[in-house]
């Protein structure tokens, strides 16, 4: 493994020497990048002696750029490790700063980034630092929590750089996990390549008049995540989207609709040639019986209004009833009795798979994370909370297992 080791300013920089030694002993190549602060604590020559490579420390250095520019350095790495990672560096990474070689290559790389923070315990506990860490984790960076103990300043608490052997062990675990994920992705690609997939996403709006409508809080993020991951896997994706403020990648055939009837019409036109249909949209159950042609006015004489609603078509149930139906996946968003309600819905609508999740009080709708339970005829698979993209991949993996 090619490791770019970023060393930032802090007394814990001396531990990075041991980390380099251990990585080299384990057979890894290490290129050290030091910040100006790091060089106040330790000399670059020490790292050069252990790594066998000259230390990189300047963004604008004609000699270094001629040998290996910061872009080439970012591409060379299999993983970028910053240990110790100072509070200043955490803040820079969160803001997307690129004012030195280390932060610039972090912006330029598409490889995994691993952070081992080290700082005073009060600095670590500061809400600003904790917020920075949370944001970086959401962006996919791995943050290893600092150790607890006596610090150089004499204080006690969390903030010590983790021991080098612990960092190396974690890097080894992550490398093994990445290899397994790459193999799983390869297997998943083999299944989905060329498959025809129809997805509905987002809410539907049922107009009352030209100004008002009945809608729901669905953002469409889950359905769009499914479309994006499937597209990356090589599937031929048709996405029927309700009114949402999301962008689909090129290669995804997007059809925009507003109402449940429009979504139903689009599904009827496209389902027959599909291998899989995923109904991720939050389709309105009812619509106004009549839509006013003009804005309904309030008046002093009228203190209430009654709307007569009629049932919308049940799109996913209709597809599941067809003799030429594809593999059908539904969603169940519930506020209580999640598993019971989802099981009943799957059986009543003859679905091959249903994805159940709780909604309300900051859960489910319009969130970046989700926690689905995948329910088939004979199995339940609860998924740990994660990004909707990761949930989407697991849904597609489950379809691969069942279809």
Image (cartoon, helix red, strand yellow):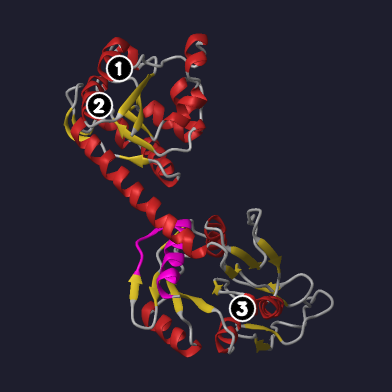
The residue at the point 50 percent across, 77 percent down is: 330
Figure quadrant of the N terminus: top left
Question: Is 39 in front, or is 268?
Answer: 268
Nearer to us: label 2 or label 3: 2
Question: Is 248 in front, or is 130?
Answer: 248
The disc, 2 or 3, on the residue closer to the chain's N-terminal end is 2
Marks 1/3: CA distance? 64 Å
Q: Can you tell which quarter of the image residue 8 is in?
A: top left
Question: Is 288 in front, or is 262?
Answer: 262
Give the image location of residue 363, x and y in percent: 44, 64
The residue at the point 22 percent across, 39 percent down is: 169
* Residue 362 visible, this orientation: no
Q: Label for residue 52? A: 1
Q: Label for residue 284? A: 3
Marks 2/3: CA distance? 60 Å
Q: Are marks 2 and 1 in contact (CB under 8 Å)?
A: yes
Relative height, residue 301 to residue 129 (above, below): below
């Amino acid at each position: 493994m090619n490791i770019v080791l970023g060393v930032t300013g802090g007394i814990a920089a001396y531990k990075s020497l041991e980390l380099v030694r251990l990585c080299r002993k384990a057979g890894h190549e290490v290129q050290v990048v030091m910040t100006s602060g790091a060089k106040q604590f330790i000399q670059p020559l020490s790292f050069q002696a252990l790594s066998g490579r000259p230390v990189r420390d300047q963004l604008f250095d004609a000699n270094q750029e001629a040998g290996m520019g910061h872009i080439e350095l970012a591409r060379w790495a299999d993983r970028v490790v910053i240990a110790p990672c100072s509070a200043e560096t955490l803040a820079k990474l969160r803001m997307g700063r690129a004012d030195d070689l280390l932060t610039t290559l972090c912006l330029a790389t598409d490889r995994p980034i691993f952070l081992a923070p080290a700082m005073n315990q009060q600095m670590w506990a500061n809400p600003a630092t904790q917020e920075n860490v949370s944001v970086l984790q959401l962006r996919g960076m791995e943050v290893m929590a600092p150790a607890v103990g006596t610090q150089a300043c004499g204080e006690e608490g969390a903030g010590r750089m983790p021991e080098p052997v612990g960092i190396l062990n974690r890097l080894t675990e992550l490398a093994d996990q990445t290899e397994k994920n790459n193999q799983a992705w390869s297997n998943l690609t083999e299944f989905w390549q060329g498959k025809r997939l129809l997805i509905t996403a987002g809410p539907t709006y049922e107009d009352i008049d030209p100004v008002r409508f009945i809608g729901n809080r669905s953002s469409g993020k889950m359905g769009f995540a499914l479309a994006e991951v499937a597209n990356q896997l090589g599937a031929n994706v048709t996405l029927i989207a309700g009114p949402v403020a999301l962008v689909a990648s090129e290669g995804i055939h997007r059809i925009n609709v507003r109402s449940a009837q429009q979504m139903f019409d689009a599904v009827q036109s496209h389902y027959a040639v599909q291998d899989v249909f995923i109904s991720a949209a939050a389709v309105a159950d009812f619509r106004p019986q009549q839509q006013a042609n003009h804005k309904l006015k309030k008046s002093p004489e009228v203190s209430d209004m009654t709307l007569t609603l009629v049932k919308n078509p049940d799109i996913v149930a209709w597809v599941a009833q067809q003799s030429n139906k594809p593999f059908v996946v539904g969603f169940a968003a519930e506020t209580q009795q999640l598993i019971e309600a989802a099981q009943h819905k799957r059986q009543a609508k003859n679905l091959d798979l249903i994805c159940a999740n709780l909604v309300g009080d900051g859960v489910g709708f319009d969130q970046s994370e989700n926690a689905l339970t995948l329910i088939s005829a004979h199995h339940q698979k609860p998924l740990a909370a994660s990004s909707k993209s990761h949930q989407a991949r697991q849904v597609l993996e489950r379809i691969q297992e069942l279809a």
